[in-house]
Image (cartoon, rainbow, N blue to C red):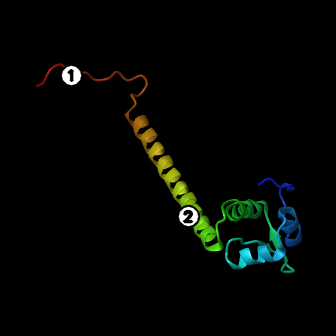
């Protein structure tokens, strides 16, 4: 879903509602249901970040394009977050294994200037 969005900033609920052609109450409902978590200003005004808008686009895609209800959207978002966490953990593991392999390879590499010892037969 393409929208006209400024880069980097915080958007008030009225601006977000207008950008996505939804009622502000829909945004409040998404917040009540835990689907969106906009930050708040000192005056308690909801402020939506670019990340919030990306999440909203995903929510609207599920609801409008795929007909997913609120409970389904919540489940999909939860599964998505779990998958992202698993991906971060897996990447951390891959980085650890790569570091360990490089360390062991460097430990086993011959030292420059040393002649490798060759055995002639068994004693």
Residue positioned 61% across, 65% down in the render:
77
What is the x, y in percent for residue 33?
68, 77
Give the x, y percent position of residue 36.
71, 71
Locate the N terminus by quadrant. Answer: bottom right
Q: How many discs mark residues in the rendered view? A: 2
Q: Element at badge 2?
A: helix
The disc placed on residue 58 is none
Tell me the SS state at disc 1.
loop
Instruction: Characterize the local packing of mark 2: few (<14), some (14-19) or many (20 or more) Cα atoms within 10 angstroms.
Output: few
The residue under the point 82% across, 70% down is 47
Between marks 1 and 2, how big is the CA–CA gap? 59 Å
Residue 94 against residue 45 in the figure, above or below: above
Residue found 43% across the figure and 35% down from its top: 106
Establish if 54 lies above or below 123: below
Q: Nearer the viewer, mark 1 or mark 2?
A: 2
- Tell whether 47 sits left or right of 68: right
The circle on residue 119 is 1
Figure quadrant of residue 21 = bottom right
Q: Earlier in the sequence, mark 1 or mark 2?
A: 2
User: Could you tell whether 47 is left or right of 123 in the image?
Assistant: right
Q: Mark 2 sits on what residue? A: 79
**Which is nearer the eye, 97 or 85?**
85
User: Is 11 above or below relative to 1?
Assistant: below
Label 1 crowd bin: few (<14), some (14–19), many (20+), radius 10 Å: few
Q: Quadrant of the C terminus?
A: top left
The residue most toward the top is 120
Q: Quadrant of residue 35?
A: bottom right
Image position, residue 70 (x, y; %): 65, 73
């Amino acid at each position: 879903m393409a929208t006209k969005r400024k880069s980097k900033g915080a958007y008030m609920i009225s601006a977000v509602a207008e950008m996505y052609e939804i009622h502000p109450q829909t945004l409040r409902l998404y917040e009540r249901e835990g689907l969106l978590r906009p930050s708040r200003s000192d005056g308690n005004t909801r402020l939506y970040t670019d990340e919030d808008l990306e999440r909203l686009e995903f929510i609207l895609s599920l609801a409008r394009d795929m007909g997913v209800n609120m409970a389904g959207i919540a489940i999909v978002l939860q599964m998505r977050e779990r998958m992202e966490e698993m991906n971060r953990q897996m990447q951390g593991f891959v980085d650890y294994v790569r570091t360990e392999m490089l360390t062991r390879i460097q430990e086993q590499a011959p030292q420059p200037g040393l002649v490798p010892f060759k055995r002639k037969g068994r004693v």
